[in-house]
Amino acid sequence: MNARAERLARPASARLSLIGVLLLSLLAGALFALTIGPVPISPGDILATLIGRDTGQAGVVIWNIRLPRVLAAMLVGAALAAAGASYQIMFRNPLVSPDILGVSSGAALGAVCAIFLSLPILAIQGFAFAGGLLAVALVSTIASAVRGVDTTLVLVLTGVVMGALAGAATSLLKVMADPYDQLPAITFWLLGSLARVNSGDLLPVLPAVILGLIPLVLLRWRINVLSLGDDEARALGIDASRLRLMVIAAATLITASVVAIAGVVGWVGLVIPHIARMLVGPSFAVLLPVAAVIGAGYLLLVDTLSRTLGAVEIPLGILTAVLGAPFFLWLLARGRRGWT
Amino acid sequence: MKVLSLLCCLLAAFITHPVQAERAVTDSASRTVTIPDRVERVFAAGGPAAIALYIIAPDRMLGWPRANRAAEIEFLAQPYAGLPGVGGLTGQGGEASLERMLSLQPDLIIDFGSLRETYIDLANRVQAQTGIPYLLIDGSFENTPAALRLLGDVLGVPERGEALARDAEATFGRIDALLAEVPEDQRPRVYFARRPNGLESGMVGSINTEIIERAGGINVLGRSATARGLVQVGFETILAENPDLVVTWDEQFYRDHRDDPLWQQLPAVQAGRVYLAPMLPFGWIDRPPSLNRIIGLDWMASHLYPDRHQIDLRERAREFYRLWYQVELDEAQLDRLLQ
């Protein structure tokens, strides 16, 4: 019996208990992350704060700083991993990440525009969100206008071209930006950070992420079929190009929402789905929740390191790459075994 | 009965929570902020703010955005010179996490510099998130006396703020009196060289080179509609613009340009009119653009107008470091500054 059949044969209850264990460890990790920080707060005080007692400065630190950050890290990690898992299944390619259709480069250009124009923080987030959506909408429109060739290939190539264009525009703005107060802000945003997240930022992002997750959950079985190839999907009565468009729209909404508050956080959407696949196999219905939970845990870990390792914040993009790159190289070295 | 119990509650609240005296202050961005009557611990949001705070009330400092280097410490007053690097909030050099800032228990945050929308927003957010009052002070040249008086008032040292403001006003007055005699078209044309190759500069309107115009020079690069920050300059442009003098703070450029056949083509270089601005403990003409540039005005004017600006730069530096940085320079240190 090969590994794949073994995974498929695994009873549903075992998968459920795996998800349960992962969720419990995530909760434990989140509680642990709340206890870490430069302001010393005893676990007792944290508990007292969480059940609503007034604990002065400890209360401010927990409610306004640590809790929003812990929640944001988990949300961003889960969202990027879920979007990455969807893209990898859909494109039948393990090297695909949510950035492949230009959502991150579009969002980056939007945010850098807003920083360049010295707009308020809410506008920076709004520009980033709109930029991400716009870039992917452009890519999809152009790709669907090109007929008669491999649709997936055209889509990915258009995405790469659009990413390069947006990257060029971003670089131009960086050259023109004020080195004293705009350039550092731009650089920091491009590397991703949750340093400034507050609870007000989370409120609009959470519904957008959930809105993007709903179609992915509802369409989980059909998305599985998509991984077999367009012809097979057609044989099973599924309109592959329409389904693909829906998955792209959902994953883009998810990615653009979290990129708007966290900046460009690389690697999570690429590496986490692989870990999830190694744990539970390629079936999308199980892969999606498992990848989301592991993504949440991974970014929680990375963000906790980012805020505690040095006296100054280390941008998330640096840490996710430092931790993610060696793992990815190892995956590459293993070849494509275990993909389907 | 109800009223009585309410009164009791209020009384109890007063006894258990001694209310600290507070007052409202309006900052340069017209934000009204409630600050404690006695401000003891101040967090500077960035490099320019740290310098302003050091100048006005160093005993309220919690740290520097980055730890000072040995060469800088020598020109700063102890024990403040040795305070640790604690990061900043404005992205002007390493971000401190909000929580790390809170662990220093500041009772006021000050930012000094740009009043752009992004910074006003940052101030409002950090204030709402941490409950610590956050003041934004306009760091432009023209606002310097007003900023000094406002900071003196906020930090409870109004006499010191006033004394510094008067010195700044006297400096501006000296420069303005000099410039009143020089029509625009007779002012010297200046190239501000940055980087070891000297090929980075700022256009008119750039905060990095604005001291040229304030001290009565003309920036050879002129004004640009698009470039607000630093620009890369081709050597041909410099040659074509033919500046009367070149200023720089980059020691390597200052050392290297004399042996560089390209720079030797420039008449200003042939005439030896390349000037290296002192950089300790902070730059005199830039780096960062804060109150440290006040002494740079006299330095710049004395190089622009060696015949008209009759000031003993050595005495002025001694007096400036005494009044503003509260350090007494010895002759060897003055020699090193004005080499």
Image (spheres, coloured by chain):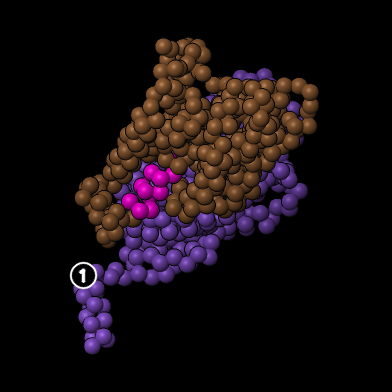
Chain colours: A brown, B purple
Q: For the point 33% across and 52% down, which residue is it? A: A61
Q: Quadrant of the N terminus of chain A?
A: top left
Amino acid type, residue under disc 1 in the picture? Thr
Residue ID for mark 1: B16
Q: What main secondary structure does the magenta stretch of the protein show?
A: helix
Q: Is residue A237 visible?
A: yes
Q: For the point 52% across and 56% down, which residue is it? A: B120
- Across and down, in percent, residue B5 comes to 23, 82
Q: In the figure, is residue B8 to the left or right of B333?
A: left
Question: Is B316 inside the magenta-drawn segment?
Answer: no
Q: In the figure, is residue B164 to the left or right of A252?
A: left
Q: In the figure, is residue A240 to the left or right of A15?
A: right
Tag 1 secondary structure: helix
Question: Is A63 inside the magenta-drawn segment?
Answer: yes
Q: For the point 49% across and 24% down, which residue is it? A: A282
Which residue occupies the foreground of this view, B66 or A139?
A139
Q: For the point 41% across and 45% down, which residue is it? A: A71
Which residue occupies the foreground of this view, A335 or B280?
A335
Which residue occupies the foreground of this view, A259 or A5?
A5
- Across and down, in percent, residue B323 comes to 40, 53
- Across and down, in percent, residue B88 comes to 43, 45
- Across and down, in percent, residue B112 comes to 48, 53
- Disc 1: which chain? B
Find the magenta span and give its range. Answer: A62-73
The picture quadrant where one finds residue A231 is: top right
